[in-house]
Structure formats: structure tokens, C-alpha cells
């Protein structure tokens, strides 16, 4: 009886795809693939990357196979064929090193996530000297099983097929290292449609140094984390941070004296409107700043053509410089330098939005503070006041409140809710301290007038809540 062996080269069905590797230990891995219609079993081949001989497994009717007896910290390539197909393209995986001991190189750092869509993200990391390739693992936050990607020689990898509006955590290892610490990202919701909560608001920037800033925003009910994007103004690519459960985030490694824009989204919302900040320049002809930017910046009073601004004194500062501009302008106007902590910005236009900032002699500029001048009244007097006094804090929880004034010598009157005059004082400065320690809790009214001015008096409501 004659027998012969032959191989059918014609492809009766398509090759398996969606090849995935799941590292079980440093010497074992489970490989899996998509099912092929008409196939009654599958055969896997694997080998160490760079070698020529394949090891062929026994056929299996399942869509996965566990490879054992592998070498530690070794890159393997593998492929699979259905009973009716030729072998698939090659996929690779890395068994990893001894996760409990030393390795020959450090872990990748500077893990960054860039959300491409609601179902895909590109993750990237810093290069490791001596590494042949890198392997990424990712999973939904709160689950235990990692999905392991094929090894790549690049410093980034695009993850696809992710769930919408889901928080993922991921890590990466070099061929010569253990896995890095875990980073997280949020795929976000449907950015083209409705979302289940409102966007974050009250975006605030606090420039810490010439290369770092603290960003903060208001909390959103129902959100379990927030994701920030930032970029240099007039560029197109956003840098996306890892998701955070806090209401603030520090950004480092920025460029000095550059204007940035940023936005933030809750896990259940679209991205907010854009806010801006400027990192500032180094002082002393290129040296680093020796103090941080002034804090507690406040717009004390706003008129149709001027505004009174203040800030907290900074230790070690010899003086302070204030700049302002129209909100959408690119160039700042320098008001001047003062040794005090209060300054008047003059020459403003009625009914316009402005921003201002301040720097100490030893610091970069702080973040922008916004204000809007009121429209002029019908009498044509461009200096007519807004009719509102700036009082802080309001409600008054302590013993004192601060009142921002246009000039010195203002008459300040405090009335209770019935209109009875409680106090009457004359200011000696443009920032007046009013003592309310002995007053009962309730609603009051503060009225400010100027003896040498024909402008209307200003009145505002004050709530005392000791």
C-alpha cells in the first residue's frame, strides 16, 4: 500500500487574527486569537525572537493555548493557524524578568496617556538605555487580570477596543526591567453628544515656578475622576494627563515664559472651556526664581475706567510689578512697580473683560485674574462707579472684613437690615479693615461714598455668620 504526505497550500479560510498574549509568570504565557468559521482546531507555533526553528504545539479546539517552560526575560514570537488556513502573521510577547529581584535596567518612567477617541488611547514612556523593546499591560481599574500587548521597539503603543467612559490603568516594562508603577487614564464619554454631568468650572492657575503650575477646578457631582489637557497656545496637539480623583493637579516640565491653555473634563462630562496661564521668565538675567508668585490676588473694586487690585505680601520681595491686558489680547501692559500690596489700574474701557497678574521682585508672574468693567451710565460720565463695593470675606466668618476703595478718605457706613446706622468710619487707605467682631449674625449693608467726588455712592450687602 502506497502512502504519501502532502500539504495543502491553498487557503480554505482566513487566518486567525486579534492575537493576544497574557503573561502568567516569567516562564508561561497564554496566547489567544479570534475564532475562524469552519475551523475544527488550531495549531500554535512559537520560538525565541531571532531564532529560526519553530516549536509546534498540539492542535486544540479552543481559541487559546498556554505555553509553559519558557525562558525568563525573553522575547518570543508566535503565530497560529486554523485547520483550514495558513499561519497568521507573527505576534510577540516578553516573559519578563524576576519580578522579585534585581534587573539589569531601570523601569520606564514619565508615563503619559493621549486619548485618541472614546475607545482608543496612545500610551508613551521614556526610553531605557539597553532595552531591546517594551511591553505594555492594561486593565479596567478595579479588575485583576492584565491584558498584555505585543512587545514594541517604540516608546509608545496605541490601545484600541477600549470601553467608552471607563478608567483604565496601565504599566510598561522594558525587556531588561520589571514593570513600572501604574498610570491611569479615562477614555471619556461621547464627546459629540450629551453627557451625564456638567463640565468643570472655576478653572484656576497658580504658577509655582517658571516651569510648573498648579491647576484647580470646581468639583462635579457624580464624577469619579478628572482629566486635564494642556498645550502651548497656537499649537494643535494636547498633552493629556492621567486621571485624578482630586480637584487640582500639578503640571511640571513646562517651558519658561510661554503662554499655555488648558481644559479639564469630569469622567461624566465633556471638556470645559479653555483657561490660560503664563509660566513667566527667570529672574536675575537667567537665574531661577527665589520665591513663588504672590498669592491671594484679589480685584477689590471695579469701575468703568479703573480697577483696584491687591495681593498678599511675599517674604523676601523688594517690590511688586502689575500687568494687565484685555482678555483676548496677546500683549500685557505694565502698570508699574510698587512696594505695597495694592495698586490701581487706570485707563480701562467700560464694559470690557480684562485680566491682570502680579509678580514679586523675586518671583515669576502669577496666574491671570479676571475682571469686567461695568458699562457707563446714561449720563455719559465715564467714571461712574459700578454701584457695588468689593468686600471680602463675604459672608464674614471672623472678626474683620476688608473693603476695597477707590481712594483714601472714603466714608464708610454700616447699616443693619432695618436701615439703622451701626457704624460710620473714614478710611485712611484704599484697603479698609472693618471690625465686625461684636455684631450679631445677620444681614447688613455697607455704603461707601467719597466727599470730593460727584459719583454715586456704592452699596453692597454683607452677611455676618460668626
Image (cartoon, rainbow, N blue to C red):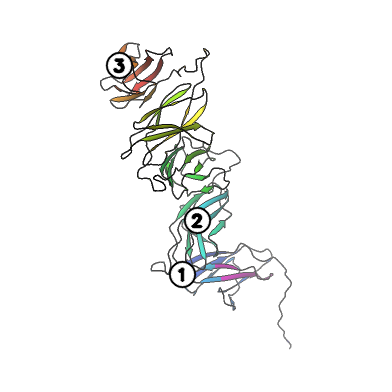
Is the C terminus in the top left, top right, bottom left or bottom right quadrant?
top left
Q: Which residue is mark 3?
A: 425
Q: Is residue 264 left or right of residue 56?
A: left
Q: Secondary structure at mark 2?
A: strand
- Tag on residue 26? 1
Q: List x then y, in percent, for residue 418.
A: 35, 11
Q: Earlier in the sequence, mark 2 or mark 3?
A: 2
State the CA–CA distance, disc 1 to disc 3.
79 Å
413 lies above or below 99: above
Q: Which residue is mark 2?
A: 139
Tell me where residue 453 appears, x and y as whole percent. Answer: 41, 13
Circle 3 SS class: strand
Residue at x 48%, y 22% (from the top left corner):
305
Residue 421, image x and y in percent? 31, 12
Furthest toward the front, the residue is 285
- Which one is nearer the viewer's eye here, 201 or 410? 410
Residue interval drawn in magenta:
77-92
How busy is the neighbourhood of tag 2: few (under 14 within 10 Å), some, or many (20 plus)? Answer: some
Q: Is residue 87 magenta?
A: yes
Residue lying furthest left? 438
Amino acid at each position: 500500500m502506497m502512502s504519501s504526505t502532502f500539504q495543502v497550500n491553498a487557503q480554505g479560510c482566513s487566518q486567525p487574527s486579534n492575537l493576544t498574549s497574557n503573561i502568567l509568570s516569567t516562564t508561561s504565557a497564554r496566547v489567544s486569537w479570534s475564532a475562524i468559521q469552519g475551523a475544527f482546531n488550531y495549531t500554535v507555533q512559537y520560538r525565541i525572537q531571532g531564532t529560526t526553528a519553530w516549536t509546534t504545539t498540539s492542535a486544540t479546539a479552543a481559541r487559546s493555548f498556554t505555553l509553559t517552560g519558557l525562558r525568563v526575560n525573553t522575547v518570543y514570537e508566535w503565530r497560529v493557524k486554523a485547520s483550514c488556513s495558513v499561519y497568521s502573521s507573527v505576534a510577540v510577547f516578553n516573559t519578563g524578568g524576576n519580578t522579585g529581584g534585581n534587573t539589569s535596567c531601570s523601569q520606564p518612567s514619565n508615563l503619559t496617556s493621549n486619548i485618541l477617541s472614546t475607545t482608543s488611547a496612545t500610551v508613551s514612556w521614556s526610553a531605557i538605555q539597553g532595552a531591546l523593546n517594551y511591553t505594555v499591560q492594561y486593565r479596567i481599574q478595579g479588575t485583576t487580570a492584565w491584558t498584555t500587548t505585543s512587545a514594541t521597539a517604540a516608546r509608545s503603543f496605541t490601545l484600541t477596543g477600549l470601553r467608552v467612559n471607563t478608567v483604565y490603568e496601565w504599566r510598561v516594562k522594558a525587556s531588561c526591567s520589571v514593570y513600572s508603577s501604574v498610570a491611569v487614564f479615562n477614555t471619556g464619554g461621547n464627546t459629540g453628544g450629551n453627557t451625564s454631568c456638567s463640565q468643570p468650572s472655576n478653572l484656576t492657575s497658580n504658577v509655582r515656578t517658571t516651569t510648573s503650575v498648579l491647576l484647580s477646578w470646581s468639583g462635579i457631582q457624580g464624577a469619579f475622576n478628572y482629566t486635564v489637557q494642556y498645550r502651548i497656545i497656537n499649537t494643535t496637539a494636547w498633552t493629556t494627563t492621567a486621571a485624578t480623583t482630586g480637584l487640582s493637579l500639578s503640571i511640571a516640565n513646562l517651558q519658561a515664559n510661554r503662554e499655555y491653555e488648558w481644559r479639564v473634563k469630569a469622567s461624566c462630562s465633556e471638556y470645559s472651556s479653555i483657561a490660560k496661564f503664563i509660566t513667566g521668565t527667570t529672574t536675575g538675567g537667567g537665574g531661577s526664581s527665589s520665591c513663588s508668585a504672590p498669592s491671594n490676588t484679589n480685584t477689590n473694586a471695579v469701575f468703568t475706567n479703573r480697577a483696584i487690585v491687591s495681593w498678599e505680601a511675599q517674604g523676601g520681595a523688594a517690590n511688586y510689578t502689575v500687568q494687565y491686558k484685555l482678555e483676548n489680547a496677546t500683549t500685557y501692559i505694565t502698570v508699574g512697580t510698587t512696594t505695597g500690596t495694592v495698586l490701581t489700574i487706570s485707563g480701562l474701557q467700560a464694559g470690557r473683560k480684562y485680566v491682570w497678574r502680579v509678580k514679586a521682585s523675586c518671583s515669576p508672574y502669577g496666574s491671570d485674574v479676571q475682571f469686567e468693567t461695568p458699562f457707563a451710565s446714561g449720563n455719559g460720565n465715564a467714571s461712574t462707579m459700578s454701584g457695588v463695593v468689593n468686600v471680602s470675606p463675604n459672608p464674614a466668618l471672623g472678626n474683620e472684613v476688608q473693603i476695597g476703595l477707590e481712594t483714601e478718605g472714603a466714608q464708610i457706613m454700616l447699616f443693619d437690615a432695618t436701615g439703622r446706622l451701626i457704624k460710620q468710619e473714614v478710611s485712611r487707605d484704599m484697603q479698609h479693615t472693618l471690625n465686625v467682631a461684636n455684631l450679631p449674625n445677620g444681614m447688613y449693608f455697607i455704603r461707601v461714598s467719597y466727599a470730593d467726588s460727584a459719583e454715586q455712592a456704592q452699596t453692597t450687602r454683607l452677611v455676618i455668620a460668626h
